[in-house]
Amino acid sequence: MTINVSDAGGRHRSPFRVLARRALALGGAGLVSVTGVVALSGSAHAAGSTLGAAAAGQGRYFGAAVAANHLGESGYATTLDTEFNAVTPENEMKWDAVEGTRNTFNFSNADQIVSHAQSKNMKVRGHTLVWHSQLPSWVSGLAAADLRTAMNNHITQVMTHYKGKIYAWDVVNEAFQDGSSGARRSSPFQDKLGNGFIEEAFTTARSVDPAAKLCYNDYNTDGVNAKSNAVYNMVKDFKARGVPIDCVGFQSHFNSNSPVPSDYQANLQRFADLGVDVQITELDIEGSGSAQATNYSNVVKACLAVTRCAGITVWGIPDKYSWRASGTPLLFDDNYGKKAAYTAALTALGGTSGGGTTDPGTGGGTDPGTGTKTCTATYTATQTWSGGFNGQVTIKAGSAAITGWSVKVTLGASQTTTGVWNGTTSWDSTGKVMTITPSYNGSLAAGASTSFGFTVQANGNTAAPAVSVCTAS
Ligand code: G3I
């Protein structure tokens, strides 16, 4: 069921709830659309004929983010095992996944990935220990002293469970703001523990598993800019004061609005010159054909040109499972066919392709578009259970590219949320209306989409929350 409302007022309108309630009652998946203006061979085959083998030939790893629930799909597992020699659990090691309830740890999904990786002699990157997102609400609600205890306990328990099995940990993820301020991002950790939470997390991490490399990981730090300067200064300070840090992760999520920076290699090099490894940790590049292929080639070449660039991880295997699936940002198409981008990456690694390219592409990238910036917000209840439900709002740019969006979500009486993902949340004074703005996903090409989601504790009220019109900028 889809409801389109073209009012740009951004206020809750009662028909949504009525119809959305009906949608939920009908199928549990209601839809409401609101319109507004180090070398490691892994399972490598013939030397250089796979990404992992070619990277190993260069003294690097080539990894992929992996989701446990896809490992049973033969194309997925075969491509992973054939092409990659490192993995990063995409969501399974995050705080909400392993310690949703205080001191009750659930490692089953993450264990599945780690066991798979070990059986194939792949490196594992641990992602992530301390992050403001995918953080259970019980953590956000703690007072400072208790939060400190909880943070150090979380690091200790998770790292102890995986001790000896993890090549590198993203100890702290995304602690800096976007933009020109160079400031730390507001988060429960930052707001209650101050700047010192980052070094405390690293110091705790070192004491638990001294053999694991300890990384700071962030996005929009791929070129020289205010944010990467701030991270650079922190790493320089840590090295000067002996705070344990071994590596910096550059997520490298690229699209037409956030292209591969021209100073990408120089930026990697300046961090490496501080005495840390650099790692490309979440690479994806939206687009298709030769334009996308060239971008992948340039990223791989930049890493190979920096001696301390230890390896590259792409953020998924086939396009269909990408967090940005509509931007087709990965190396394999939905049927695990090798794209032009795959061949370009393999060639840049010095490998030789054993298979054909199945993606003819357009070579053009994405048209940034012109005209009035608009977006739509479409609400879907993606999962319901007796005590609540997961909601997802898909934001789609209109005929012009946008660099930001904003949507209000109004909870029903008695409802509370226990987590929001892929969006930054601010609450009004009633505690019922959250304004969601992008976390990483503000820039959308014309017609492109992204989504954010949230979990609602119903407390007896299973009505769909009201979603306002989408405001684009
Ligand atoms: O598992 C539930 C499923 O049960 C439910 O039906 C479904 C309905 O919404 O949600 C599923 O959870 C999803 C989860 O990934 C697991 O698939 C969430 O919707 C989805 O929003 C969540 O997104 C993840 C996102 O981090 C959360 O912030 C992406 O998969 C993951 O790729 C992304 O990864 C981040 C890195 O950790 C940090 N850097 C940016 C990167 C991209 O956003």
Image: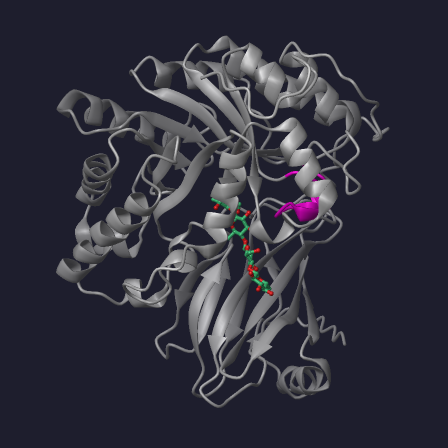
**Where residue 431 sits in the image (x, y, percent)?**
37, 76
Decide if residue 248 is on the left or right side of residue 466: left
> Residue at the location (74% across, 76% down)?
3
Q: Is residue 322 magenta?
A: yes
Viewer-side residue, 196 vs 77: 77
Q: Is residue 89 visible?
A: no
Relative horizontal placement of residue 260, taking residue 215 as reference (left or right) = right
For residue 472: magenta?
Answer: no
Residue 407 is drawn in which quadrant?
bottom right
Q: Tell which quarter ligand 1 is in.
A: bottom right
Residue furthest to the front in view is 119
Residue in the foreground of this view, choosing between 15 and 235: 235
Residue in the image at 60% along x and 54% along y: 69
Q: Is residue 395 above or below residue 172?
A: below
Q: Magenta region: which residues? A: 317-330
Lateral position of residue 12 relative to residue 185, left or right: right
Q: Nearer the viewer, residue 337 or 473?
A: 337
